[in-house]
Image: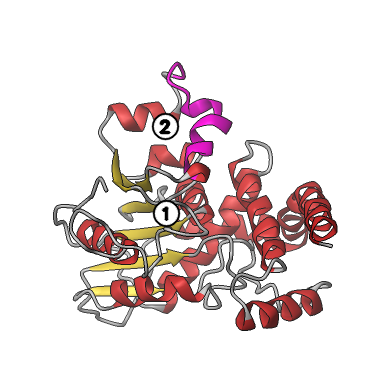
Amino acid sequence: MISGILIGIGVFVLLALAVAPLDALGWWSREGADEAAELVTELHEEQAIDTITDYDQYVVYLSGIGAIDGRSVPAEEEPLIAAIGDIPGVCLIRDVFPYSVENKSLTGQRPLAWLWKWIEKLRFKNPESLAGMLINGRNAAQLFVSADRRYGPTYNIGTAREVFEALLRNGYPFDSGKPVTLVGFSGGAQISIGAASYLGMSDIPIRVVSIGGMMSDDPGLNRVEQVWHLRGTKDIFEKLGGVMFAGRWPHAVFSPWSDALAQGRITIYDLGPINHNAKAHYFDPNTFSEQDGRSYLQITIDAVVAVLTDQPVRTVTS
């Protein structure tokens, strides 16, 4: 029974990988090309914002591959999101869905909306449901589209457009020089640096916080002021990024990743013996460090808050 379910999930993931670029390409053929041209123009022009805000920085949270839409994310991520929102002077934006170029919820106007609604109900009852892996597989496929040199530019300009629109909705003062930080967990980190390829064309200071991100050597790294990569030493998926993407190999000396490392624009923190998911993961409130007694969830929260407030990051070794 279980083996049959796993085979079915595997087939679904392969199909998701095969059709993954169609979402971005379909958007591009309908209105994406026009919207992309408008975005490039707007990024080079000062946006008139009447609202005066007291925010020091704007933070856009991009969830991991378990998200249904910008706000329907796995419950385990909510404490981190709340902690970011509690930082004085931070305007938190969390309504951008990183796995859709049109910011369209999986349960919205889609042919398979019925399937995602059914899975969402199952996951609400049992967060560990195997059916939830279908969401992970579908969204992971979009991660690889973002990293692909052929389809990535189309996908990433769509995501950049959604982030730009979110900044407009929240009254970001485009001529202020206030930083915009994209906080991406897992696949959200890759999509963050992909979007930076276009957001960084403006005078907006773009920064990225990666939490266990599986990132490529994306050209967006050339337009990011700083990347803080927070990783667990037992995170296998994070390590795959350094293996799967040749531009991150040690000999790839002229890749955007290598250049950013050499220029000191990537800072890597090994948080401790943390896994990507399952047990003892970044958002685990029930596994504690032997070194200082903090839960793994608290270690992650403390690290993200420290980066956003320019404080030292506290890591553990056990």
Q: Quadrant of the image for the N terminus?
A: bottom right
> Who is closer to the viewer here, 232 or 230?
232
Residue 217 percent across, percent down from the top left? 49, 34
Q: Amino acid at mark 1?
A: His
Residue 65 seen from this side: yes
Find disc 2 in the rendering and name its residue: 257
Magenta part of the chain? 238-252
Label 2: how many Cα within 10 Å (few below 14, some 14–19, many 20+): many
Which residue occupies 40% across, 54% down?
A: 211
Residue 37 percent across, percent down from the top left? 59, 55
Q: Is residue 233 left or right of residue 40?
A: left
Find disc 1 in the rendering and name its residue: 44
Q: Is residue 125 left or right of residue 44?
A: right
Label 1: how many Cα within 10 Å (few below 14, some 14–19, many 20+): few
Residue 177 seen from this side: no
Which residue occupies 85% across, 57% down?
A: 4
As measured in the structure, the alpha-carbon distance from the residue carrying label 1 to the one carrying label 2 is 26 Å
Residue 11 percent across, percent down from the top left? 83, 52
Q: Secondary structure at mark 2?
A: helix
Instruction: Provide the major secondary structure of the magenta segment.
Output: helix
Which residue occupies 63% across, 83% down?
A: 125
